[in-house]
Amino acid sequence: LGRALEGRARLQAGGDLRAMAELLPRVAHLELDESSSVVDVDAGAIRTGEVVRVLPGERVPVDGTVLRGAASFDESHLTGEGRLISKAEGAVVSAGAIAWGAPVSVRASAAGAETQVASVARLVEEAQAKAAPVQRFADAAAGPFVWGVAAAAAATLAFWATAGASMFPAAVAAATGTGASFGTASALPPGALVGLRLAVDVLVCACPCALGLATPTATLVATSLAAKRGVLFRSGEALEALASCGVVVLDKTGTLTEGAPRVRSVFVAGGADGVADEAALLRLAAAAERDVRHPLATALVSAAEARGGRNGDGGFDYVYDSVTVPGCGAAATIDGRRVAIGRLDWALGEVGMGDDANGLGAVDGIPDGLTRVYICRSDDGMLGYVDLGDALKGDAVEAVRTLQEELGMQVYLCSGDSASAVNAAAAAAGIPAAYALSSQSPTDKLALVEQLKADGARVCVVGDGVNDAPALAASDCGMAVAEGVDAASEAAKVLLVGGGATRISDAVRLSRSALSRIRQNLGWAVGYNALGLPLAAGAALPTFGVALTPSAAGAMMAASSVCVVGNSLRLRGEFENWKVLRGD
């Protein structure tokens, strides 16, 4: 039964890896040209730069970018999130994602074994093969344990065959006389007969299997479960290191926030021809910014398209004479009138309205952490403004609350961004202002980690794995937030694939649960042998007249292995409960 349960755990973990491999379709629709001509080929034969067509309901066979078309994609195989994500031309898609809505053409950047999902499977397999420190302890103890058991069996035989028979003659006589436990007539002296049987009991009852199974079974289950949530442990050592951390240092951009600005609010001055509402103002801004390659411009164009803008041009007939001035803004002539977007004084000057009354006082009241751009037009002056900022991830507040309240961790927010942006993000996420550190260089982050460790804390650092590499390497456990395995720093022991901030709390909670199971398993294995071996050696025989039979000793040994494996398998049930509680 114990072997069957262990095999079941390994099959389930191996099944998770096989399921990842099976996410890649075997056939791809290779486009021969930009027309409708396609040919079905082996997906593994697709080369970088080739274009494949993905039909609604099919899985994407390669990593790549959308070349033509738009569709909604289910990327839960990597992120663990079941929501659909809309992607159009230029968006990055991952192999194994399911396309819905319409056909799309994808230009391949990686195929087969080079895709993200294949890299994830390799990392999980490698993690399951690498032993945690606690497992190495158990493995080191198993060898001496076997020799110790053999010595105990020999000592048991020697004791009962000599001193035991004279010290406890009644017990020996009762045991050999009844035959209930040891049989009847024998050519051996009674003491030697008792000693021989008890020595066999010691050998059979001893359970080094429990020691050997205590750690790898729990590690196997935990790493496969973590992969389903987009958490990739590089080794069993990472699992143990993360479980011991009591302080977590979070980067802001891309870790706690989305990592890209979004339109947060729109103000329309009113009174201008054709700019009566927010949608109209955003369409005008998008038309002027359509050729600008800047995060703020991208955010404005996306917001306009979300409100009905057409292809980022706002639906205007003539857009020309575009210009971009770094640090100031962008301008263009739209339907014969000059439009400028950016800093207020520059935008007003660009449209020849330097003394516009609408702009008076407009620079006041900018919320912390936001960037304000003004939209001005010749003859009209300031038409309005848009506040943009990097928003918290949807689950950031829940992640921070879980880390602080449920897991008892001290949470720092450490960023190179301005004080206003960092303080605003910390306040929104529920991080005390005293633990919100701004204008932090990589060297400053490294110094913070070293100071916390010098104070006796076990520190986990979560960052993007590039500019946070020094702090990640110096921490007890570095966690890299990555869109793909290749984007993560080698300094990180744990990779978080997908955008959710709750990956962080999930990783900590799962690692602690796994380490708790490992300690319970080791405690059970040690406790069982500490109690079972004296009983098998006849410690209760003189006082209570009780001794084991070889069959009973064998049953106890099997039960010990079953308990260890079964306790590790409880992680799966606990994982499902977390999913139910969070509504996943």
Image (cartoon, rainbow, N blue to C red):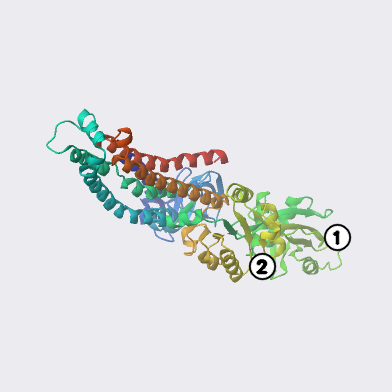
Is 371 left or right of 539, judged from the image as shown? right
Q: Is residue 234 visible?
A: no
In the rendered view of the protein, which quadrant contains the N terminus?
Answer: top left
Q: Can see residue 488?
A: yes
Q: Which of these two is toward me, 202 or 8? A: 202
**Mark 1 touching mark 2, by CB under 8 A?**
no
Q: Is residue 365 left or right of residue 257?
A: right
Q: Tell me the amino acid under the disc marked 2.
A: Ser
Observer-nearest residue: 418 or 315?
418
Please report the residue visible at 44 percent of the width from the left and 61 percent of the height from the top: 49
Residue holding disc 1: 358
What x and y, as percent, mark residue 201? 26, 40
Residue drawn at x 68%, y 62% is 289
Left or right of residue 315, residue 270 in this image: right
Circle 1 packing at 10 Å, graded few (<14), some (14-19), many (20+), is some
Question: What amino acid is labelled 1 in the image?
Answer: Asn
Q: Position of residue 567 (x, y in %)?
A: 42, 41
